[in-house]
Image (cartoon, helix red, strand yellow):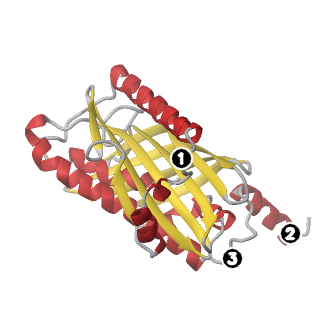
Amino acid sequence: MKINQTFAAIVLTASATQIARTAELQAGTLKVWNAYLKNADLHMQERVARGLPFLWTDESPDRVARVRRGEVVVAPMVGHGSEEVAQGLIHDWFGAIFVPAATIDSLWAVVHDYDNYQRIYRPVVTSSRTLACTDTRHEFQMVWHRTVFVTAAIEGHYQAHDVKLDQHHAYSVAKAVEVREIERYGRTGERLLPPGAGNGFVWRIRSVTRYEERDGGVYLELEATALTRDIPASLAWMVNPVVNHLSINSLTTTLCQTREAVISSRGSFETMALCPIAARGSHRAKTSGE
């Protein structure tokens, strides 16, 4: 799933006046981030090799029951949701939800509808558009903003790909290949900062989504991982609990908005191509009689 605005809430790491200072991304921090993702990928491969369930949800009967009856289950994948690294923080959260009467294709039709993300995921997402795509690979651009004491706005350029393992199982991986902070968003003097510059609200984002179609719907799981600037030790006791609370709420809201979009769009998206640009081109050709 391409829902990396999940970590919009993490802007609180720069919300207090004492924290809002320039924090440029360092090479050592980026190295640790890349190693973290590599280890996460190895862990996923080990799950498959050990024959563990495809879904994290299925590892607990209680978790399955909660998700099946409509709850959104969210849990940290590391520590209490974040891990300190050299001059930064890695945030890693996991969420699961059940979308009744859905198929993987109908769910994909919604999450690939990047041109409408500002409607589906409002008010956090303010603009979004497809840049390029095939039926399995996508590039899109998105701007999101969040105000928690201060206003933070981020423009991201994302790449994603989908893998359908069989008729009932699929997964998607999306990552931001460029993240840029928008300084003075919505005000006079607004400008786009270079990658890695600014307050360090978000430096890197990746999401891994799993889909399993069964029980009359689709189980949807989203793991969202982000790299941000660090929090001064003197303020961590106050800021960390709030950051975690907002991250949980943000992930929960994103999953619920996705479910609502699939349910409300039932039928209208069933025949949409996996590439929105291709779908728009086909519509224009039919309309013009070409």
Q: Amino acid at mark 3?
A: Ser
Q: Position of residue 225 (x, y in %)?
A: 41, 43
Residue picked out by circle 3: 268
**Rendered-image quadrant of the C terminus:** bottom right
Count of marks overlaid on the render: 3
Asked whether the residues under the numbered discs 1 and 2 touch, taking CB atoms below 8 Å apart as contact, a structural biologist would say: no
> Going from the N terminus, do you reach mark 2 or mark 3 first?
3
Q: Does 152 sit left or right of 164 as displayed?
A: left
Please give the residue where the numbered disc 1 appears in the rendered image: 52
In-image side of 106 versus 176 (left or right) = right
The N terminus is located in which quarter? Answer: bottom right
- Image location (x, y in percent) of residue 187: 31, 54
User: Would you say 123 lies left or right of 274 here?
Assistant: left
**In percent of the image, x 76 and y 69: which residue is there?**
271
Nearer to us in this view, 278 or 28: 28
Q: Please, what is the three-letter code of the amino acid marked with disc 1?
A: Leu
Q: Is residue 134 left or right of residue 6?
A: right
Residue drawn at 41 percent across, 70 percent down: 66
Residue 286: give its label. Answer: 2
* Up-down relation of residue 173 to residue 216 (above or below): above
